[in-house]
Amino acid sequence: MQVTITVNGVEYTRDVEPRMLLVHFIRDDLEMRGTHWGCDTSNCGACTLWVNGEPVKSCTMLAVMADGASVSTVESLAKGGQLDPIQKGFQECHGLQCGYCTPGMMMTGRWLVDQNPQITREEIREGISGNICRCTGYKNILDAIEYAAANPATSEVTA
Amino acid sequence: MTAVEEVPISAAGNPIGFGRMHRKEDVRFLRGEGNYVDDINLHGMLHSAILRSPYAHATINSIDTSAALALPGVHAVITGETLAGLGLAWMPTLSYDTQAVLATDKVRFQGQEVAFVIADSRYIAKDALELIDVDYTPLPVVADAKKALDADAPIIRDDKEGQTNNHIYDWEAGNKADTDAAFAAAEVVVTEDILYPRVHPSPMETCGSVAHMDPVTGKLILWTTTQAPHAHRTVYALVAGLPEHKIQVISPDIGGGFGNKVPIYPGYVCSIVGSIVTGKPVKWMEDRAENLMSTGFARDYHMKVSIASTKEGKIQAVKVDVLADHGAFNGVAQPTNYPAGFFHIFTGSYDYPAAYCSVKAVYTNKAPGGVAYACSFRITEAVYAIERIVDCLAAELKMDSAELRMKNLLRPEQFPYTSPTGWVYDSGEYEKTMRVALEIAGYDDLRREQAEKRAKGEYMGIGLSFFTEGVGAGPRKDMDILGLGMADGCELRVHPTGKAQVRLSVQTQGQGHETTFAQIISHELGLPPEDIEVIHGDTDNTPFGLGTYGSRSTPVSGGAAALVARKVRDKARLIAAAALECAPDDLEWELGRWFVKGDPERGKTIQELAFAAHGSLELPEGVEGHLDAQVVYNPPNLTYPYGCYICVVDVDPGTGQVKVRRFIAVDDCGTRINPMIVEGQVHGGLADGVGMALMELIAFDEDGNNLGGSFMDYLLPTSLECPDWELGETVTPSPHHPIGAKGVGESATVGSPAAVVNAVIDAISPFGVRHADMPLTPANVWRAIQGNPMRTDMAVE
Amino acid sequence: MQTPAPVEYAKASSIAEAISLLEQNGDESRVIAGGYSLLPMMKLRLARPDMLVDINGIAELSGIRIEGNEIVVGALTRHSEILSSAILFEHYPLFRQAEHVIADPIVRVRGTIGGSMCQADPAADLSAIGSALRGTAVIANSGGTRTVPMREFHTGPYDTVVAAGEILTEVRFPIRPGAGSAYEKVERRAGDWAVASAGVFVVVSGGIVTDAGIGLTAVGADHYCSPEGEAALIGKAPTEDNLAAAAKAASDSSNPYADQRGPVDYKRHLASELTLRALRRAVNASQGA
């Protein structure tokens, strides 16, 4: 089947099997490998990206279901060479170690802060409970997302 | 070196030496530009999938691959028979046993590898699995380790000549006679059956490989999730008969290891064979189910622990009998002379003269493994045993558990301390560390609060754990894996313009080596960390070493890095003497430069000396050009990091639910190269402890069905289960380590489970509970309160 | 990661089109909404539909509104919308309490009440609430619509009355002035399936419980509810003893089996304990209302 999906602002039209998972479409067909996968049962959240501005576990969506949609992945966070505040937060606060859960964690974190710039630490803690990390013990990730909320980007940088 | 030293800050804002700094490796991960094995895509690359046994124990009568081979897009289907023809159906394990690569005669655990399909895409490969027809005859199963040596137990390893039962080995340490005597004379003896159940490291990235045997050059490049690239290369050379100089093992970015990525798995071998057979690169990436069901699990120690004490709480002796469940193949990774790893450090942090342990290892119809998940070679089991039994003793004596520990902790003047089982602990000021933890926790207030709550029928618990571990394996005369000594190399090159590259033999999986090793070189040479590139993970471009696990990177490779930098610094001195036309003894060192004593204006920076070393300066007799050095560091001993952890929980007795309210962790890992990274390592290990204590479990039913084969059943802690960790530190350097550092990667995973379990048991002790096994799920806690705790490793009926 | 078997796919833009696609493509065609129930089953190859009919674009299936004396929740309504719904929170706060502990925040963005109901997992939370509140399922087919009480909707584990060629369009809940409700769940870890849950409502009027609904999940209660527990309570004063008797009756009527979440004695105990705790809170809410 033919699908047309806009990813990080660029439109792609490809022929895919209906059963192809969105995560494989992004990684293998479009060769954007920042989005990862870590389980079989939609638990870990490593594959989190946005579809039409909402977070989705891309291992649990078919590419065909995203036909006509706008997808954002971790590769869209940095703009014009500048790291997004969420990325800066993860760096400042040592919110990543092996980096494998990090793209999904940042996509969730970015969305949480966008939804509620006054988000509290406990709301962040609940908000990332669908993203699993084995390295950090989460405390620094909470710090990183708090940092992003407290330090929003100060100017629009055109891509 | 206990006070925080002032270090100068570089132009990029980094400490020139030890201190907090952002990680150099972060940017690629933040941008989604990490390079993990599944990111590797080579021209013409094929994909693969493994067919696995649904049975825990069954004879294979026949395998029909014809339908799978006929599926469009399938290139090859490899079976055990194919491999047998190449002498590759079996491979050695890291414990001198053998393991099936693909099953030939029978399958011995649920999930065992039976066939390997190579196809154009992972989707087709998975489709092909369903078309392979295997005819099995199920056999009786050994699922309960306690029944493995029953007279009527089926023999699992009938492939091994002379194997008449499921016994692997017996091993012991300590002094049995002294220990028996101490127990016989003791005023108080407490005994408990303590299980450390089977758990799984479960890194977020599963295991996999891309094998590319170039048919023209005959060189095999293997990108793979390995914590020990050089050791793997040597084993592949020995096993596959490929010349070692024609094998390049590359560990790209690794998404977590935790010991899961130490063994060589059948999938890697099959991908190599697949590449040879098809002439194309072959990728193998396992699913999460495969990871949980077939790769190196951890623990599975059934321990009977006894402690002997005076009435006043002075420990006299400890003994432990262990039944070790190794699964169907003995695949543990540990030094050859230590079949039970370093379990005999179970004597712990306390001062008493007698101890003895015996370990009996058995085969069962389960996946192979045992040493993994940050266990420091079974030290998790040892620390859990001693810290749990000490709490049981405290309960028996009706003594506060902190007071009992304080009474028995080793004292500073006893170091270096030789334990009753022969370990030589290098340094420690235990009481000091414990007092810091008690202070941060507000321990006395917590006990007051507990008493008030109990009066109201509310149940909170406070659990302590004081752990000592021995890491940094190890002295090569004593410690080898498959005959490869555990010494590690390091190479340093300082380029003409004063920038450096350091090549490591260890392999990061998130520990921050690209930063911390730059900081070590920085500390020794005064080059800013941003001017030092750390190279690792590629066997063609790094010196030999046994890899990263058992917290050995800092103690061994970190030692090597410091020493190689000192070699460079010493050589730089000779070059400086030549440049300044003085004697080497006339020179003094300050960070980054050699200068003439008494005439500090006259000096040369490392950068200037680097250029001079490559230039036309006449060098003294015996001094070669360039500013490079190479070292192989053979550590004289292990290092002994330690710490005191305190966990506070609230338990709802009506439901058994446990909430971890607080967790205080005070670690002493000697010199702290980058405190930010040290803290991160501790945070992660503490989450492991919460996970194992409360929810992580690979259980089996009597048919050998693996009940922990997905993240719906193998539960990992989320942000909601983890409190904001409260950390403290003390710094007691290792006297024998070049920079006094001890390593910390596994400390928190080692020390934390006991703190959580002790806290839960403390909370429900008013109900008469003395012990219950991990994981303390709500069901298990409730059952313990009813006086009927669950056996957790076997399915409930 | 595991991958689904080959499947056909079509996107429907109306209920009629969805029904038509289902009918044309036979018994093995399935509706897909959020996908968080169906796709994992397909990846494990436990579910092997021939055709997926994507209903995410059918706006009329979405939304929460009041119609007369009922709250109407479209089948496509997402968990996150149920969580934040002011209408549901006003009348039946147990929805919000349950949604906080269903799956995880990301799954809740797309997972739907229809998907959850039709998946009919024996541990599903919304099924217990649907039965507790004596809701009504509205099912559309080519002949029109039919209604089925929620207490008859589920016919067994993973099985409902929705037949081939049919689609659940909405679930309706009667509004009960003065009702208090509460949800109590025990899980081994955040986001896990329930070890046991109880979702209840009561109406206390004139010092008597005039109406009650006791929903249970994960304990093998027929149709996710306990009429026995309700009968033990309706018409009585909401004293602690009476609540405890109702909770015990609810537990006695359940039929849990042992699994990795817990043994039978524990689950039975939870059926009673959680029903009791939920009833206490519901009574307080009703009396405070």
Image: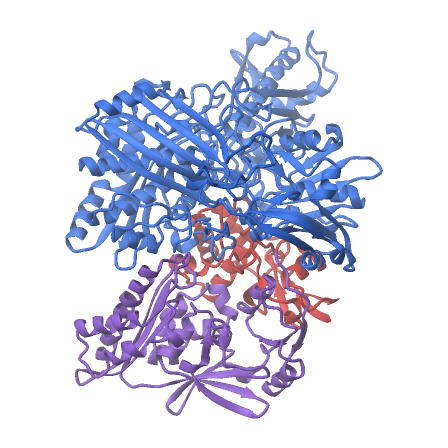
Chain colours: A red, B blue, C purple
Q: Is residue C173 left or right of residue B739?
A: left
**Residue nearest the observer in this picture, B78 or C124:** B78
**Quarter of the picture holding the C terminus of chain C:** bottom left
Residue A158: tell me if it is visible.
Answer: yes
Labels in figure, total: 0
Quadrant hosting residue A103: bottom right
- Above or below: residue C7 compared with residue B645: below
Quadrant hosting residue B508: top right
Which residue occupies the extreme left position in the image?
A: B455
Q: Is residue B357 left or right of residue B332?
A: left
Which residue occupies the extreme front position in the image?
A: B152
- Above or below: residue C153 compared with residue B433: below
**Quarter of the picture holding the N terminus of chain C:** bottom right
Report x, y in % for residue C113: 47, 75
Report x, y in % for residue C205: 21, 85
Q: Is residue A41 left or right of residue C182?
A: right
Residue occupying image coordinates x 70% and y 30%: B237
Residue A30: tell me if it is visible.
Answer: no
- Above or below: residue B68 compared with residue C16: above
- Above or below: residue A64 compared with residue B489: below
**Residue nearest the observer in this picture, C255 or B712:** C255
Report x, y in % for residue B783: 29, 53
Report x, y in % for residue C185: 35, 65
**Residue nearest the observer in this picture, A84 or B100:** B100
